[in-house]
Amino acid sequence: MTLSDDARAILILTGHLRAKKKSKELGLLNSKQWNRLRLYLEQIGKSPGNLFREEEILRQWADQDRWYRLEDAEKCVKRLQHGAALANAVTQWAKWNIWVMTYLDHDYPWRLKERLSNRSDFSPVLYGVGDRSLLQDGGLAVVGSRKPPAELEGYYLDYTQSLGEAAAAEAVTVISGGARGVDIKAMTGALEKDGNAVGVLTHQLLEKSSSRIYRDYLEGGQLALVSLVDPEINLFKVDRYAYGSAAMQRNKYIYCLSDAAVVIRSDKKGGTWSGAVENLQESWVPLWMKKDSEHDTEAANKIIVEKGAKWFPEDKDVNDHLRLSLRQRDIRRATILLTVNLSSDQSNRADPLNFKEWGQFAKDLLNKKKTPADLIYEPFGQVLEEEDQGCFSIRRIEGLLNPDRINRLSQEEESWRDAGISILTRGDKGYPQPLKIKLRHDSPPLMFVVGNLELLVSEQKKVAILGLRKNDGKTDLNYAHSFGAALAQKGGLLVSTNHSKIEKEAVKGSLENDGKCIVILPGRLQKLLSSGDYNEYLGNQQLVLLSISAPHTKVQASKQDCDIACALSTAVVVVRSGKKGIIANCVSEWRKREDLPIWIREAGEPIPGNQLIFERGGGCWLPNGEDVETHVQYTDRSVSEWLQQLQGPLYAGK
C-alpha cells in the first residue's frame, strides 16, 4: 500500500499509530483541531503534503489561531520529521488487507462530507477492510440495544434478522455498528441472504476482521468494516475518554452513511439513545422506530418518537416497513428520473416532465394518496389508473422509470458529485421555503446547486436584479456594477439569473466587494464550474450557483428562472426591460401579488419597457439623479412602506 504525501501527513498528525499507552501517544491533533488546520490549508491554497516541505505553515497557523498553542505546532513539526512508525504500520496493514482512505480520496463517502461539512466533523481518515465501494451505496441503518431484556430477545432480535433479510432481498445495504445484539443480527440477517452490509466499528478493526463471523463475507465482497482509529489499537485500554468520544463519533457515521435509519430498541441513555436524538436534531436521515413491547418498561422508543421519530405501523409487515423507511430516498430517485434528462439519454427516450407538468402530476398523486416512490414499487396502471392521461400517459412514465435509466442514475449522480454539485428536492431540509410558499405547485421539484447552500435559507435582505440582454452599453453596466457593490457594502444579498450582461455585471460588482450572491443559471452548470470563473468566490463561501436543468444540458433562459429569483427575494430592481419578453411577463405577474417591492430604474433617456411597467402599476421609480446608495436604501423598505410609496410622490409625480 503506497500512501500519498497528503495521506502520510494526515495520518502522522491525527493517527494513533499503534499507541499502547495514554493519550499523549495518540494523534497530536484531535478532530476539531485538525479541521481548523484543514480549513486554514484550504484558505491559503495548500494541501497537507505541503507540511513536509514548508514547516512554517504550522507555525503561522498556530500564531494566527490563538485557540491552538504555538508550542504544540512545534511538536507537530517534529512528528512530521519522523515517519518510521507510520511506515512500519502501513506495511503491516497491507499484509492484513487493511486499507486507508483520507478525505482527499475520490471515493471518500460523499454523504459524510455533505452531511457533516458544516460542522467540519467528518474524519480526515478512515481505516477499513473489505469492499470500500459499499460506503458509497447508502442503505438502511439498523441500530439498537446490545442486550435487550432476556425474556424479550426473540421479540426484538427475530424482527431485526427479518429486517436484514428483507433488505438483502431488495438489494439494500444494511449499515450498523458491529456490536452484539441488534447490530450483529441486522448485519448477519442481510449477509446470510447474499445481501451487503457495512459495519462502523469503534475500534479493534483488525481483531473484528479476523473473526470467523465476518471472514467469508469480507472475502466475498459483501461486507466492509470501517473504523476511525488505528486498526490494531484497543482504544478502551489506551484511553477511556478517547474510546467514549470515538463511540459517539461512530454513531453519527452510521446515520450519515445511510439513507434512512431504524431503531429497534433503545435504552433511556447510552449510544443508541444519543445517536437517535442527534440524528433528529441534525435531520440527517428519516428515523423510524419499531414498536416496543408492552412488557418492556425500560425501553425509550416512545420518548424518541415524541422527539420526532416515526412509528412503524403495527399492521404492516417487515417488507412494508423497509419500503416506508426508504420512501424519502425513493421519492428523490423517482423525482430525478421523472424530471431530468440524463446525459446518456437517447433522443428517442420519453421527454421528462417540465415544471408545470410536474406540478400537476404531483398534485394528482397527492389526491390519490400516493408519492412518486409508489411508482417504483407498484404497477404503473394501479397508480395512474388510465392508459392515457395526456402528458402523464403510462407509456411516458414507463419510459422515464425504465430499469435502464434507474441503473444509470447512480453513475449520473456520481458525476454530479465529482463536480461538487448537490441536488435539493422539495423534501430536503435545505430547500428554500419561499419557493414552496410563493410558487406552490410551480416551484421546481429539484434544483442542482453548488457553493454556500446556507445562502438559500439566509434571512439576509435579498434583492433580485433584472436586466434585458439588449442594454444601453456602459450606462446600464456601470449602474448594475455600482448597485451590486453598494448592496454588498450594505450587507445585502444579490439574486441574479445571469441572463444578461446587466445581471452578470451586478454579480461582479457584489462579489468584488465581498458581497454574497445567489445566481440562477439556465443549465450548463458543469461547464461553468470547469471554466473556473467563479472558483475563488465559491471557495470564499460568497456564492451559490443554482440550476433547475441537468448540469450537462444547455437550455434557453426561461421565465421560471426569473420567478425563482423573485420568489427568493425581498425586493426586485428592474434595470432595463422590454415592452414584452421574459422580464416584462415576470414583473406583470408579480406586481399583482402586492407582497414584493418592485423598483424600476429611471434613466436619463426614457426606457420604453420600464415606462410600460410603471404605467401598468408595476412598481416605483428609482429616480434618475439620485446615487446608487440611495437606490439601495429604497430596497430596504418593508412591503407596507412600498405599498404606501405607490401613492406617494415618486408614483404620482410621473
Image (cartoon, rainbow, N blue to C red):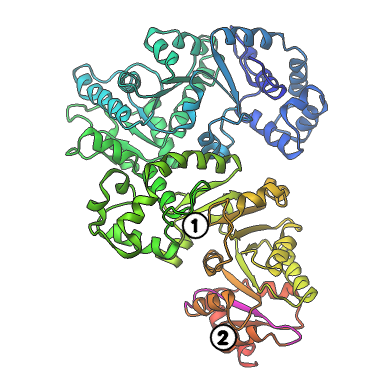
Regarding residue 541, the answer to whether it shows in the image is no
- Majority SS type along the magenta span: loop
- Residue depicted at x 63% and y 81%: 578
Residue 152, by quadrant, is top left
Residue that numbered label 2 is attached to: 646
Q: Is residue 85 magenta?
A: no
Residue that numbered label 1 is attached to: 432
The image shows residue 493 at horizontal and vertical percentages of 64, 61
The nearer-to-camera label among 2 and 1 is 1
What residue range appears in magenta? 593-605
Closer to the N terminus: mark 2 or mark 1? Answer: 1
Circle 1 packing at 10 Å, graded few (<14), some (14-19), many (20+), is many
The image shows residue 166 at horizontal and vertical percentages of 28, 29
From this viewpoint, which residue is outermost toward the bottom? Answer: 653
Query: Front-most of 66 and 198?
Result: 198
**What amino acid does circle 2 point to?**
Leu
The image shows residue 508 at horizontal and vertical percentages of 73, 61
Circle 2 packing at 10 Å, graded few (<14), some (14-19), many (20+), is some
